[in-house]
Image (spheres, rainbow, N blue to C red):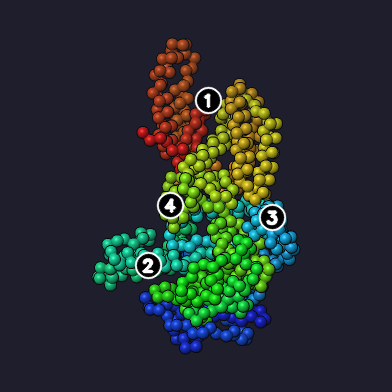
Amino acid sequence: MALGPAARGPGPGLHRVSSVQRRPGREGRSSAHRPGAGPPPKPAAPLPPRAAAPPPAPRRTLACLFRVGGATGPSGGRGLLTPPPGVGVACGPCAPAMLGTRRACGGAWLLRAARGPEPGRSASGARGQGWLQPTGYDTGVKVYNSLTRRKDPLIVSRADAASWYSCGPTVYDHAHLGHACSYVRFDIIRRILSRVFGCTVVMVMGITDVDDKIIRRANEIRNLCLVSPRVRCPPWPPWKRSARSRDAGVAVGAMSVSPASLARLYEEDFKQDMAALKVLPPTAYLRVTEHVPHIVAFIERLIANGHAYCTAKGNVYFDLQSRGDRYGKLVGVAPGPVGEPVDSDKRHTSDFALWKAAKPQEPFWGSPWGDGRPGWHIECSTIASLVFGSQLDIHSGGVDLAFPHHENEIAQCEAFHQCPQWGNYFLHSGHLHVKGGGEKMSKSLKNYVTIKDFLRSTSPDVFRLFCLRSSYRSAIDYSEGALLEARSLLRATAAFVEDARAYLRGQLAGGPIQEDVLWERLGRTKAAVQAALADDFDTVRAVDAVMDLVHHGNRQLKAASEEPRGPRSPAVLGAIVASVEQFFETVGISLAERQCVPGAGSPAALHSLVEELVRFRLKVRQFALASGEAPGEARRQRLLERQPLLEACDALRRDLAVHGISIKDRSSSSTWELLDPRTEDPKPRS
C-alpha cells in the first residue's frame, strides 16, 4: 500500500510544532483549563523565533494517517474519513508541522494529492484590481466573482478535484431559514457544477464550535438551571444531573452545559437540518477546536513574516498596516477607525484579533503567548489552508461575510503563504428578507423561523424551488405567497409528468400529437437551460424554460385527448418527461418519489398495498358502470342499483387523498400517486 508524504515525515528545513507550546516556568501545568478554575496567570513576553533544528519525527500508524480531528471524526461520530488511494491525512499530533511550509505540503493535507501540482496563473488585466486569472480546467461557466465585481470564466485547478471552502455555522442555536437559503443555493450550484459541467467538487466546511456566542449561550443555560432548579434544560438530549447536585437541589445542567457540549448538540442539529433540506454533505467537516494546534502554528508564521504581533496581555493581532494597499480586495477600502475599549492593547484600531487571551470561566488552550483561544477569522484561514494549501478555487458564504470575515481571511492567507492571490473566486449569496419588513432574517433581530418548524408544513422540494426562482446573489423575500407559487409550480410539473406517463402506458385516451413541434421545443429547451446555467448559474431562466416546455406538453396532451383514438406518438413525450425529471434531479428536486411517504416504514410494501387497493377499486367501478346489452329502461335500472358502488369508489378516493394518495380515474383505467402533503396547496378551513 503506497502512503502519501504524510507518512514520511517533514521535508528538509521544516520544524515540528507541538500541540501546546510551553513557556519557561509552565512545566507541569495542563494546557486544558476547566471553567471555574479562575483566571490564568498573566502571560510572559512572547518567545523569540525558535531555531530551525527539527526534532525526530514521531512514528505514525495507519490509524493516525487516516484520522481527521483526533479520536472523533468530522461527522461527529467515531468514523474515520478515508481519502482517495495514495493520499495521506495528518492527524492532530502530526499535522502542525505541515503548516511550516511556504507552499502546501503534498499528501499531508486532506485530499491534496488528488488535486495535483498547482498550475501557473496569468494576469487578466486592470479591471479586476490585479486579479490573476487561473489556468487549469475551464468549466464553461461564467460566474460573478466578488473579487472582480464582474462575471469571469470559472477555471478550476482540476476537473476531478475543484477545491471549495464553505464557511460553516457557529453552532450555538438552531439553524433558521436564512441559513437554509444560503446553503441550499450553494448546494444547487455544487450539483450543477458536478452534473452539468462535469466538475467534481472537493468541499470542506469549517464548524465554529468555540465562540463568544457559544460561551454566552452556555452561561445563560447554566445560570437558568442554577436560579430555577425546576426549569428544564434543553431537552435534546436530556441534560444529566449528578447525585451531588440532585441532593443540593441544583440542576446539573450547570455542570454539564459546557460550551463544548452545547456546540456538539447544535452541530448535530445543523447536520440533521441540512439532510432534511437535501443539502449534500461536504467532503469533510472540520471543527475549530480540533485544529487549535494548527491555528497556533499559523499565527506563529504570521508573526515570523511580520504581519502579526503579540501584546503584553497575551493577545495576538493581525497588523493591518503591514498589508499596505493590498487590503480591501472585496470591499475596496480599508476599514476606518472604530470605537475601541479604553484598555485596548491594539497598535491600530483596525487590527483584528488572531488569538484572544483567556478570561475567567472560558475554555482556553495553551500557546506561546499564554492561555487563550483563537479569533474568528483565523479559524477559516487555517482550516482552508490545512486542506487546500496556498491556492483555493472557490470560497462561498453569505454576503454579510464578505466584510470583515472574508476580507480578513484573504489578508491572513496571502500573508501566511506569501502569495499574491490565495482564493480565485468568492461567491456570496443574498439575504433572505422578511416580507414587508425589508430586513434580513436573523437571530439577532428575532424574526426567524427555524428549519425544523418550517419543514413541518412545507417540503424541502418546495423550498428548493422557491430558492431556484431567484438569483443566488439577490436578496429574496420570504412570504406565504412566494411559497404557494413554488408549491403550485411543483404540483403542475408533477401532474404533467404523471399524465404523460399515463399517455405512454395507453391509460390516457387520445390520438396523435404534433411530434415535430414538441421535438423542436425540446431541443430549444435543452439549449436554453444549458446557456442559462453557464451564465452565473441563472436558475431563474432555466426554470422558466423548463416550465414553458411543460406548458407546451400539457397543451398537446389536452388536444390529443379531445380527438378520437388513432395512431399514438409516445416517444417525444417520453423524451420530455426524461428531460424534465433530469433537470429537477440535477438541482435536488425529485418528481418521482411515488414510493416515499414521510414516516413510512416500508415504502415498497406500501406501494404494493396501494397498487392492489386501486386495482380492486377499478374493478368495482368498471362493474358499476357496465350496462351490457340491456335495453334503455333496464340499463337505467341497473345503473341505479349499482350507484352505491360508484359512490363508495368516490368516497374511497376522497379518503385516500387525505393520506396523500391521489387516484385519477381515466376512461378505462385508474392511476395513482403518493403525494407529500407538504407540497399540496393548503385547503381553506371551514
Amino acid type for the residue under numbered disc 1: Ser
Among numbered discs 1 and 3, the one appearing first in the sequence: 3
Which mark, by number, is residue 113?
A: none
Among numbered discs 3 and 4, the one appearing first in the sequence: 3
Q: CA distance from mark 4 to mark 2?
A: 23 Å
Q: Position of residue 266 (x, y in %)?
A: 44, 61
Among numbered discs 1 and 4, the one appearing first in the sequence: 4
Among numbered discs 2 and 1, the one appearing first in the sequence: 2
Element at badge 1? Answer: loop
Q: CA distance from mark 2 to mark 1?
A: 67 Å
- Mark 3 in CB contact with mark 2 (< 8 angstroms): no
Element at badge 4? Answer: loop
Residue picked out by circle 4: 447
Q: How many marks?
A: 4
Residue closest to the eye, 127 or 366: 127
Crowd around label 2: few <14 · some 14–19 · many ≥20 (10 Å): some
Amino acid type for the residue under numbered disc 2: Asn
Q: Position of residue 100 (x, y in %)?
A: 62, 77
Q: Residue at x 67, y 70 (%)?
A: 419
Residue closest to the eye, 622 or 17: 17
Among numbered discs 4 and 2, the one appearing first in the sequence: 2
Outermost bottom residue: 25
Residue 425 visible to an observer of this rendering: no
Q: Residue at x 45, y 14 (%)?
A: 635
Which mark, by number, is residue 152?
A: 3
Amino acid type for the residue under numbered disc 4: Asn
- Mark 3 in CB contact with mark 4 (< 8 angstroms): no
Residue picked out by circle 2: 219
Element at badge 2? Answer: helix
Tell me: residue 386, above or below residue 682.
below
Residue 335 visible to an observer of this rendering: yes
Residue picked out by circle 1: 667
